[in-house]
Every structure is written in C-alpha cells, then in structure tokens.
Image: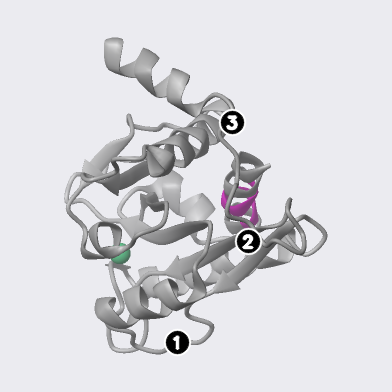
C-alpha cells in the first residue's frame, strides 16, 4: 500500500515535458508490433501473433489521426526486425512513449486477459504511470487484467524513454480470440490504449 501511495504522489502533475517544442501538447508514441517475418510469435491454428499485433497497430494509428498524438509504427510490413534494431530505431526517434504489442499463449486454455509490463529499472516511474493507466482503461471495460508487472525484457531494459509491453490477450483462450482475431475486437483493444493516452 505504501508503494501504491508513493506511485500516486509521483504521478500527480506529470505531463509530457519532452513533447515536440513546436507543438507542446503533441506527444510522440512509437508502436512496436512484436515479431514479424520469419518470427511469427505465438500461433493458434493458422492465426499468428505477428499479424494480430500488426493489425492492432494499424487501428491505433487510424484512431489517432485527428488526435494530438503522433503515432509512429516501428514495423509497417511483415518484416523481421531484431530486438537490437528495434532499440536503435526507437532511440533515434526520441519518443515520449513506446508501446510494444504482443499476444500471449498458454497451455492452460482458461488463462485470459490483458497483461502490462514495465522494465525492472523504471526508476523515474514514468513507464509505470502509463502502464497503470493502460490497465485501468481495460478494467473500466470489465476486461480481466493482472496487476502491473515488471520484467527483464530486452526492449524495456535497453530503452531510455518510457516504455510498456502490452500482452493483449491469449491466443489459446476462446473468449480472448473473439477480440484478438476480429476487426471489431482489434479496434476495441486499440481504443482502450488510445483512451489511456488522452
Ligand atoms: Zn510476442
């Protein structure tokens, strides 16, 4: 509980101080669609994680066209990108936030819901601030969510800007797949992320 209060105090008044100086309220968000090319990610029958996260990324960009959020898609096609390439490209863009999109798979087909991760070394707590907002956005729509988690993921630990990894749901769970594998569902997932950036 003490930790939670500390987080709330830290987050009050936080804003995008590093946003585009010509447009101080516009924020730059890089969307990293996980996997790509020969790296398909998780798979359920013929449905591939790399395709799902690319589709949700496109929905995110479309939803932000008339907002004060500049969305940059790190992977625009179905190409393989190493994790180091992703880090290098992101660093060169100096974004205000990075959202890395993935989808889960479990042998336990009952497992479902959205998970959000931040780096273990999130000393400024900025990633945790965004991660918490994203989880709250899904919770408001009665999605199953776990508590914000920290992880030693290569991308998260090697970036020097706020970054979160979102696991959008489980390809192994029938209910989650209704969202992950439909245009309506993908748009809905993207909407929850966008609403947390407002
Ligand atoms: Zn993945």
Q: Secondary structure at mark 3?
A: loop
Q: How many marks?
A: 3
Give the distance between the C-alpha atoms of the residues marked 3 and 1, in whole angstroms: 31 Å
Q: Give the mark, 3 or 1, whose residue is nearer the N terminus.
A: 1
Q: How is the image coloured?
A: one colour
Residue found 41% across the figure and 57% down from its top: 161
Disc 2 C-beta below 8 A from ligand 1: no
Mark 3 highlights which residue?
A: 141
The local crowd at label 2, few if under 14, some if 14 to 19, many if 20 or more residues have their Cα within 10 Å, is many
Quarter placement of the C terminus? top right
Discs 3/2, front = 2
The local crowd at label 1, few if under 14, some if 14 to 19, many if 20 or more residues have their Cα within 10 Å, is some
Disc 1 C-beta below 8 A from ligand 1: no
Mark 1 highlights which residue?
A: 78
Camera-nearest residue between 153 and 55: 153
Residue found 37% across the figure and 60% down from its top: 102
Q: Is residue 190 left or right of residue 9?
A: right
Q: Is residue 79 left or right of residue 54?
A: left
């Amino acid at each position: 509980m003490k930790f939670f209060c500390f987080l709330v105090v830290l987050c009050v008044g936080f804003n995008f101080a590093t946003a585009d100086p010509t447009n101080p309220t516009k924020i730059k968000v890089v969307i990293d669609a996980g996997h790509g090319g020969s790296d398909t990610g998780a798979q359920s029958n013929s449905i591939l994680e790399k395709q799902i996260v690319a589709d949700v990324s496109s929905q995110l960009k479309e939803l932000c066209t008339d907002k004060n959020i500049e969305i940059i898609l790190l992977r625009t096609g179905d190409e393989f990108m190493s994790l180091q390439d992703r880090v290098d490209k992101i660093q060169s863009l100096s974004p205000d936030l990075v959202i890395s999109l993935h989808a889960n798979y479990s042998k336990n087909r009952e497992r479902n819901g959205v998970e959000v991760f931040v780096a273990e070394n999130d000393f400024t707590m900025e990633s945790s601030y965004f991660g918490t907002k994203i989880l709250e956005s899904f919770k408001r729509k009665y999605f199953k969510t776990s508590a914000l988690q920290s992880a030693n993921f290569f991308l998260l630990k090697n970036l020097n800007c706020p970054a979160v990894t979102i696991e959008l749901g489980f390809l192994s769970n029938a209910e989650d797949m209704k969202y992950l594998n439909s245009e309506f569902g993908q748009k809905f997932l993207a909407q929850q992320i966008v609403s947390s950036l407002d």
